[in-house]
Image (cartoon, rainbow, N blue to C red):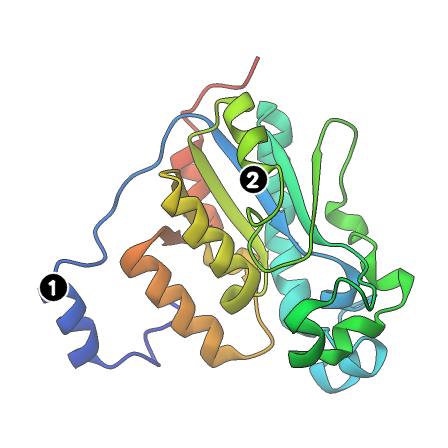
Amino acid sequence: MRPWDNLIGEDEKTAYEAAGFGRSAGLGERPALLIIDVQYRTTGTHSMPFSEAVREFPTSCGEVAWRAVEQIVPLLGLFRERNWPVIYPHVAPKTAQDGGRLAGKIPTIMAVPPKGYEFVAEIAPVAGDILIPKKHPSAFFGTALASHLIDLKVDTLVATGCTTSGCVRASVVDAFSYNFHVAVPADCVYDRGATPHAANLFDMAQKYAEVLSSAELAKRLAPLPARI
């Protein structure tokens, strides 16, 4: 079962297939892992139902976030074992001066306490990882991410984190636009809504990325050499 199978009708799937969408573009040989916005403001300090999680941080996604974190852990372990780059695009604390249109659209994001901006401990950065503070959805917009990737000779980006319909999707589209191979392990991304989560995974699978399970992705990455 793919995440979108109960959402996207067979006639719609057939239409995309007939138009030639959804083909595999493959993966490259030099991957990097993006862990996007996995901060306590999106997960809560521990796993709890959504209705409780939003009382701690209004921007939390609840239990689905922690299920994704559990799947990111072994994938991150593989990247650390192979010495492949691990990059943390994350929302930086916002002020009234730099909130932009987001401050009007989602005012709760302007009132996140300091704890909310901390990285989730189970998959937090270590020495040698790259931190990319950002003010907008895409990890590329207004950041040095592309410069880092060129310097590291990366050709494949694995996008994890949140939200599937927001910062993950925006980063995936930009990565695709820069001609990187892109993979999205579906069980390593999360959203506060099941419908936008599934719909955006479907759309990314049709146009921009390899969307698969983290277990299948690990199998496909396994033959690649470690980075010296």
Q: In this view, does 37 lie to the left or right of 189?
A: right
> Does residue 42 lie above or below 10 as drawn?
above
Foreground mark, 2 or 1?
1
Q: Find numbered disc 2 in the image and state the secondary structure of the residue it sits on.
A: strand
Residue 177 at least partly seen = yes
> Does residue 46 lie above or below 132 as drawn?
below
Going by the picture, which residue comes out furthest to the left?
18
Residue at 55% in and 54% down: 138
Neighbourhood count class around disc 2 (C-alpha, 10 Å): few under 14, some 14–19, many 20 upward: many
Q: Foreground residue, 39 or 104? A: 104
Q: How many labels does the image show?
A: 2
- Counting from the top left corner in percent of width and height, residue 183 is at 42, 46
Q: In this view, does 48 lie to the left or right of 198?
A: right
Q: State the image quarter where residue 79 is shown.
A: top right
Q: Foreground residue, 189 or 116? A: 116
What's the residue type where badge 2 is placed? Leu
What's the residue type where badge 1 is placed? Ala
- Counting from the top left corner in percent of width and height, residue 222 is at 44, 30
Q: Label 2: which residue?
A: 33
